[in-house]
Image (spheres, grey):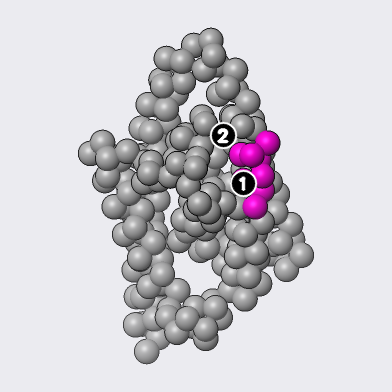
Amino acid sequence: MDQFTRSILLMFVLLNPFILSVYLIDVIRDLTFPILARHLIRAAIVSLVAFWTFAILGDAVFEDVLQLRFPSFLIFGGVTFLIIGIRLILGGGPPMEGLRPDSAGISGAIAMPLMIGPGTISASVVTGSRLPQGQAILSILIAVVAMTVSILVFKMVHDYVRDRNEPLVHKYLEVAGRMTTLFTGSFAIEKNMNGLQGWLQIFATT
């Protein structure tokens, strides 16, 4: 598999529309399709700007602007995902369950932290380092568009199925929630290991 395809899959997996559909179930259920589409597109645009910035500038954003080292960011992101995973295992529910359709700034709440997070930002940096700038930008665009379309398709399926078999919707959410726990916990450990490996490399060169 070439680096371009790998980069698309990496970003799409981290954006994971199946997990997002669980987090956004309140707005998916209660908003009409046009309104939900408008909020998702706005969130996607905000996310794209952030992802492209990190893909183009790379580690310089952390070291020169934010004055921190990238491994520290990976470790913090891993700890954050680990807390979310533990909460899901203990039955705490999705971290955005308090988001309601009548909340102000839905687009911003969807963009961060659901789309823009430690995982997707680190993936943007990796994508920018492994691909030419134009291909990096295009790969991120494809992943974000695919994620947005997937959630909108889920919205259409949800509305169709809910009117006919609401228990099926609840069953999907239960299964997706369990998958979320496995993915989130595993990803957290991976980010922590990558961050620790980065720090060991820094110590070895000093």
Spatial separation of the CA atoms under disc 2 and disc 1: 10 Å
Residue 172 image-quadrant placement? top left
- When the figure is inspected, residue 17 is found, relative to residue 199, above or below; the finding is above
Q: Residue at x 71, y 61 (%)?
A: 137
In the picture as drawn, the residue positioned furthest to the left comes out as 90
Using the image as rendered, state which of residue 9 and residue 143 is in the foreground: 143
Residue to which mark 2 is pinned:
31
Residue 149 percent coordinates (x, y) = 67, 38
Q: Residue at x 38, y 44 (%)?
A: 98
Residue 38 percent coordinates (x, y) = 66, 44
Residue 4 image-quadrant placement? bottom right
Residue 4 appears in view: no
- When the figure is inspected, residue 41 is found, relative to residue 124, above or below; the finding is above
Check whether the beta carbons of the residues at disc 2 and disc 1 lie within 8 A of each other. Answer: yes
Part of the protein shown in magenta: 34-42
Based on the picture, tell me whether residue 155 belongs to the magenta stretch: no
Q: Amino acid at mark 2?
A: Leu
Residue 103 left/right relative to 204: right
Residue to which mark 1 is pinned:
39
Q: Secondary structure at mark 1?
A: helix
Using the image as rendered, state which of residue 10 and residue 64 is in the foreground: 64
Magenta-highlighted stretch: main secondary structure? Answer: helix
Q: Residue at x 34, y 82 (%)?
A: 203
Q: Residue at x 27, y 40 (%)?
A: 92
Going from N to C along the chain, the mark reached first, 2 or 1, is 2
Q: Quadrant of the C terminus?
A: bottom left
